[in-house]
């Protein structure tokens, strides 16, 4: 965790990869490595780790949020809205999630 928090992304990636090899069913190892990939701009690798995270824990709120952010970054706004809808099924009163969804919808309505 020290590598991750201090911004040493390569060593953090290695640490999480080692953790995943030792404990392949440890959800948070996959999720943290997804975050490292995201921070490095490796969105495809991040998405792969997010998918694995969600296979292990389908209601992983952080992984879903990361997936939504990747979709936004890639301009796949409807997919992001779908992810936020899923998050709202899990936590219906998440103000932050509602706000993200509303901002995307507002952006889409202004650009048409």
Image: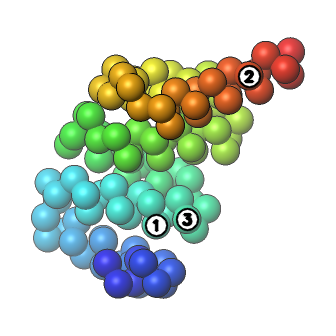
* Secondary structure of residue under mark 3: helix
Q: Which residue is mark 1?
A: 36
Viewport quadrant of the C terminus: top right
The reply to whether dot 1 and dot 2 touch (C-beta < 8 Å) is no
Question: Which one is earlier in the sequence, the residue at label 3 or at label 2?
Answer: 3
Q: CA distance from mark 1 to mark 3?
A: 5 Å
**Along the horizontal axis of the image, is 90 left or right of 64?**
left
Q: Residue at x 26, y 34 (%)?
A: 59
Question: Which one is earlier in the sequence, the residue at label 1 or at label 2?
Answer: 1
The reply to whether dot 3 and dot 2 touch (C-beta < 8 Å) is no
* Secondary structure of residue under mark 1: helix
Q: Is residue 65 above or below residue 15?
A: above
Report the disc number at residue 39: 3
Image x and y of residue 36, in percent: 46, 66
**Along the horizontal axis of the image, is 91 left or right of 112?**
left
Q: Residue at x 16, y 57 (%)?
A: 26
Image x and y of residue 21, in percent: 20, 68
Viewport quadrant of the N terminus: bottom left
Q: Is residue 21 above or below residue 38?
A: below
Q: CA distance from mark 3 to mark 2?
A: 26 Å
Give residue 87's quadrant in the image. top left
**Along the horizontal axis of the image, is 104 left or right of 97?**
right
**Label 2: how many Cα within 10 Å (few below 14, some 14–19, many 20+):** few
Q: Residue at x 61, y 62 (%)?
A: 41
**Label 3: how many Cα within 10 Å (few below 14, some 14–19, many 20+):** few
Image x and y of residue 18, in percent: 25, 75
Q: Which residue is mark 2?
A: 106
């Amino acid at each position: 965790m020290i590598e991750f928090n201090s911004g040493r992304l390569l060593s953090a990636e290695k640490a999480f990869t080692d953790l995943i090899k030792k404990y392949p069913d440890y959800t948070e190892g996959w999720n943290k490595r997804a975050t490292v990939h995201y921070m490095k701009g490796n969105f495809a690798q991040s998405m792969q780790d997010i998918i694995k995270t969600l296979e292990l824990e389908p209601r992983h709120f952080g992984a879903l949020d990361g997936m939504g952010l990747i979709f936004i970054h890639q301009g796949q706004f409807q997919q992001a809205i779908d992810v936020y809808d899923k998050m709202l099924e899990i936590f219906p009163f998440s103000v932050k999630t509602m706000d993200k969804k509303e901002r995307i919808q507002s952006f889409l309505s202004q650009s048409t």
